[in-house]
Image (spheres, rainbow, N blue to C red):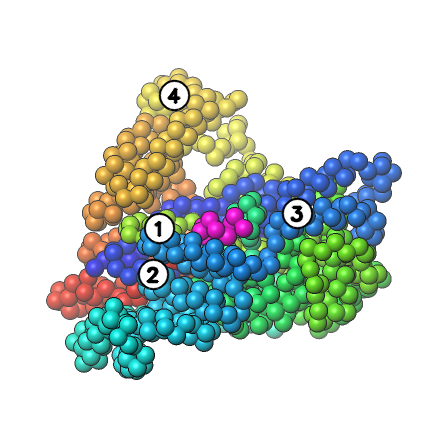
Amino acid sequence: MLLKFYYQYTTTYYSTTSYYSTFTCRFQGRQAPYSPAPALPSQQPCEIGCTLIMDLPVEKWKLYINQKLTSLQPLLKEELCPSMSLRDSLLLSLTLLHPEDEEYLLRLSRYYCVKKDPKMTLSCKEEGNKWFRKKEYRTAAVLYSRALSHAEAGSPEMAVCYANHSAALFHLGQFEVCLEDIKRAQGGGYPEELLPKLLLRKADCLLSLGRFQEVTEALSSIEEKMSADHHVLLSQFNQLKLKACKGKSGSVCQPAVSDRIQKDLEPWEESSRISCASASVSLNFSACKGRHLVAAKDILPGEILVSEEAFVSVLCPGESLLLQGSAEAMLNGQPANEDLHCHHCLKQLLSPVPCQGCSYAKYCSHACAQLAWRTYHSRECSFGGLLLTLGVFCHIALRSVLVAGFAEVSALIKQSHTEEVVAEPVAEAPASSGVVEENSASSIPGCDADGRYSSSYQAIFCLLPHTEKHSLELRLLCSLSVAALCKRLGEAGLEAFISGKSTPEDQGGSKAGKACPEWEVPGEAMLRHMLQLQCNAQAVSALRVSRSENGPVASSKQVRVATALYPVVSLLNHSCEPNTSVTFSGRTAEVRALQSIPRGQEILHCYGPHRCRMGAAKRRKQLLSQYFFECRCLPCLEELQPVSGKRASSQDGLFHCPACHKLMQQGAEGLLHCSSGACKVRVHEDHFQHQLSDLRLQAEVALELLQCGHPDQSMELLLKCRLDAKRFLSPAHLMVGEIEDSLAQAYVTLGKWQEAAGHLRSSIQAVEAHYGPSSIEAGQELFKLAQILFNGHAVPEALHTIQEAENVLSRHLGPQSTELQELQEMKACLEELLGGGGGTSVASARPKMFNKIMNY
């Protein structure tokens, strides 16, 4: 038996409103599947200034508003000046929003209708049955989950869907969650004639979990319900009964439960002045930096500085839902965020509890469903299609107002009209890694009367909307979107809406009417929040794993799950080389120190472009585009300093001379020249980039072959890629590292651990050269190497690598992370092996925690 493990090659960096897709791959033995889901930093694939389709309204509404802007009279365009107040912008938008505009928006929202449709229950269930018969259980589980979303609560159809979902989970080895589904099916009117089969599955789950006493009780209950008509089930019943007896006596069938080492929670002393922050942190304010955090005392690497639950978070809808419409997306079987994460706490969604009012929202438990309904969803539920049309930013703006409550929103709006609200957003302040000055203000924006800064609505309200810096197109889009939402919500009546006592009867109705005057207050607040989000939203990410049902290779990537507001995390200023790392567990963000931070030094976060991933000029351009400040952090200033008469380039040393194989250096007008004085070769950078592009395409083909179960063909192509790469790339080039990483995967698939370890060591050299030996990328590569060495029975080397991986990953993920716990369990296993004098094999001493859960 082999250790089941992740195998990932990742290029991770932080961001707020977008993410960067990563390639990850996991290899495992062919036993019960398991997939931990460690929270890693958020990442982004697009330029920072470009928000994704999920953030802003759908493309058709954006184009419609742009056309409306073009048709406006010049005087109206002048009136929409950057200095216009938020209140006046909303009032003007209410007059500009004509009935035909509202009707067009409602037509768009019907395309994303989230009403329950009994026909979809049947269609999704039948489609799930097809995939189940193909033994594609993850796809089947997704479709059964979607069928549940459309089923009427407490109906026999819902009970059957839960039973089918439990069957898929059983084959995925998710026994605990399978039992939850079986319980829900039993309590929901599951057909009596099918009950014995369901109860046999329950007994099989209990047997797999080692709960033998409960197995005996379940079998007794089944025996009472079985009749002569169930002769097909008798064989399975007798086998389970025999296994239960043997298991109870201790001869076979040991519990497949996790033996994870229980760790004490990390020591945590919360600051008396900043909620959710450590006592090691203090809040400062200055004219040039705005609000910012500094070390109140010397901070050690890996120390947790902030642990904050989002004030509000909104799940990002799957792209297929927005591009195809709900009906087509429902039947495609491809899992999306709404299928895989709880819509409230954002944790992994294995057995869904669907909303009783709409087909979109799903929760991990009845507790989350009830909390969401009470706090905000009862007033959102009928507007699901409209909110999907208007985008995540508009949805967050509405949810912020609902969570805060009308009284607090009104008080802060009134205050903002009578006095100047001074709030320095973290994005405006230039970051520095030096010692910062003391507070220059008697009170800091966002703090309460006692001077305490809380993770509160008041803190969120004090973030600046940057109205004067946003483009006219964006301001009008946000204003008209909020105005349209206010009109629709106003039809419910303000008092009823805020209290959640009633909602509109028909989302798709065409009632004429205008928003109540009282809606000016929450409308202004929503417009403020929508404009704040470009600079202050945080992308919440998670590691998503997928693989074929029978193959040993699993691909995984870091994906954006949700967008959220974190008032305390928002206090962190930017640096292109930060001294902190931010990770997520559900909707909780944790900030840890990456290095020692002396007392008085500023605590810094990376907003997206890290110096290891991007040159200074491009980083500064992107930061200016999204966050409206010109970065003057130390890494940027250092990179922009002249070096020997020229500026340093991120391309220096990455390419080899095709003639003498010396390193190429950046020259003028895109030309690279050989670093050897004797060689006069000059090559345009575009030539190397074309070669690199071709090489990357070949490597992707090789990886697809590997994932489709053709390791020999994949290896042959990868070895050719490796040879081609050596002709023009430096060993430190990331493409060289990716090829070596893929070769390691191929050898792991074939069980050739020693060869795999050799290639992975070469990959680690490239990663460390590019990102640094203490980066999370290097830590993940060391984690993989430790697993390979463990499986290859290379005990001393494995122990050494485990220690190295622990040192790096503990700074980023903390001791409670899945990866750290797995490293510790591997270490305990190997130390036991050494202490036992060789009488135990690694395979037999393998920790049991890997027989657990696999994402579907």
Which of discs 3 and 4 lies nearer the camera? The answer is: 3
Dots 4 and 1: beta carbons under 8 Å?
Answer: no
Magenta segment: 327-335
Q: The disc labelled 4 sits on which kind of residue?
A: Gly
Q: The disc labelled 2 sits on which kind of residue?
A: Leu
Which of discs 3 and 2 lies nearer the camera? The answer is: 3
Label 1 CA crowd tier, 10 Å (few <14, some 14–19, many 20+): many
Quadrant of the rendered image containing residue 740: top left
Which of discs 4 and 2 lies nearer the camera? The answer is: 2
Tag 3 residue:
108
Distance from Cα at disc 3 to Cα at disc 4: 64 Å
Q: Is residue 787 left or right of residue 186?
A: left
Label 2 CA crowd tier, 10 Å (few <14, some 14–19, many 20+): many
Of pointers 4 and 2, the one earlier in the residue sequence: 2
Residue 528 in the magenta stretch? The answer is: no
Label 3 CA crowd tier, 10 Å (few <14, some 14–19, many 20+): many
Label 4 CA crowd tier, 10 Å (few <14, some 14–19, many 20+): few
Of pointers 3 and 1, the one earlier in the residue sequence: 3
Q: The disc labelled 3 sits on which kind of residue?
A: Leu
Quadrant including the C terminus: bottom left
Mark 4 secondary-structure assignment = loop
Of pointers 3 and 4, the one earlier in the residue sequence: 3
Residue 788 picture location, percent across and down: 26, 52
Which of discs 4 and 1 lies nearer the camera? The answer is: 1
Residue at 77% across / 66% down in the picture?
A: 494
Tag 4 residue:
677
Q: Which mark is residue 547?
A: 1
Of pointers 3 and 2, the one earlier in the residue sequence: 3
Residue at 15% across / 66% down in the picture?
A: 840
Tag 2 residue:
172
